[in-house]
Image: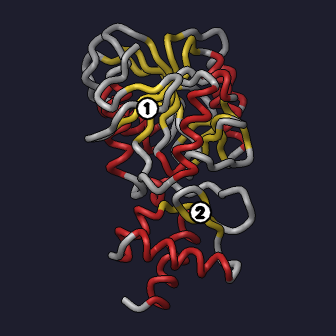
Amino acid sequence: MFAAERRQLILEMVRANGAVSLRELARVVQTSEVTVRRDVRALEAEGLLDRRHGGAVLPGGFTRESGFPQKSHLATAEKTAIADLAAGLVDEGEAVVVGAGTTTQELARRLARVPGLTVVTNSLLVAQALAHANRVEVVMTGGTLRGSNYALVGSGAEQSLQGLRVSRAFLSGSGLTAERGLSTSNMLSASVDRALVQAAAEVVVLADHTKLGTDTMFQTVPTDVITRLVTDEPPAHDDRALTELQALADQGVQIAVAGPGAGSGPAGGGEGGGSAGR
């Protein structure tokens, strides 16, 4: 594939998804990450996209939210590994809340095997993943359906969470930084996520490395409220993601790194890749 063809495909992917990792771009255009990085740099020089922490985003600073069909095909291996590790945090008979997102949907598929579990969610996809789990009770919020991510939002969803208390909340989002914590691109989704956080004794964020260092419009969970981050291991050359992990650990966030071969997390709160210890 010629450079012009590669760059056009890269540009189309970023326009369709809002943000795409270098790893995913390299896979789709069937070349190395080094070549993709050079293409992204050239497209940035033309003002067609921006480079961001191991990936590329639409120009303008804050990334926009992708629709579910696009997000479901991004970083699939990473999301699977994150969900496997996060599921180990949940014990039989617990009550948890699970927010909307493609990574939390993967988590829900694994929670279907936990007996006596109660899951409160505003996500139709999470509920669907648990619908046939014989020993799991699913409690859905009220609210208005937001079709782009199959989530219930609005005052109905928020009011249904008042007075609720569970052991932990599992949330995803559009971006995560040590400065602002977890954020998302949609105001209604952010408001419901904040209500989910208020219901939980602990907050567990599920975010693959492409979201590390990305900042979006609406803050959902400040860094000092995040108990634990479950993520995958950033590529060795992704200095910004690695720096962001260290900064999160320095602020007291426990880091659990998922995936084969994952080593210990950053000093000050990291955990090995084979366990999500309590």
Give the quarter of the image for residue 183: top right
Q: Dividing the image into 4 quarters, which one contains the C terminus?
A: top left
Q: Which amino acid type is marked by label 1?
A: Gly
Residues at circles 2 and 1 in contact by the CB criterion of under 8 Å? no
Q: Which residue is mark 1?
A: 265
In the depicted structure, whether residue 236 falls above or below residue 144:
below
The residue closer to the viewer here, 207 or 260, is 260
Q: Residue at x 63, y 31 (%)?
A: 193
The residue closer to the viewer here, 270 or 152, is 270
The residue closer to the viewer here, 136 or 105, is 105
Q: Which residue is mark 2?
A: 18
Q: What colouring style does the render use?
A: secondary structure
Q: Is residue 242 left or right of residue 234?
A: right
Residue 168 visible in the displayed image? yes
Q: Mark 2, residues whose alpha carbon is within 10 Å: few (<14), some, or many (≥20)?
A: many
Residue 129 visible in the displayed image? no
Q: Mark 1, residues whose alpha carbon is within 10 Å: few (<14), some, or many (≥20)?
A: many
The residue closer to the viewer here, 65 or 210, is 210
Residue 227, position as x, y percentages in the image: 55, 20
Residue 35, position as x, y percentages in the image: 43, 76
Q: Secondary structure at mark 2?
A: loop
In the depicted structure, whether residue 35 falls above or below residue 55:
below
Q: Which amino acid type is marked by label 2?
A: Gly
Give the Cα distance between marks 2 and 1. 29 Å
Q: Is residue 84 left or right of residue 71?
A: left
Q: Is residue 185 left or right of residue 34?
A: right
Q: Is residue 107 left or right of residue 12?
A: left
Residue 198, position as x, y percentages in the image: 65, 17
Residue 87, position as x, y percentages in the image: 34, 25
Q: Dividing the image into 4 quarters, which one contains the N terminus?
A: bottom left
In the depicted structure, whether residue 52 falls above or below residue 153:
below
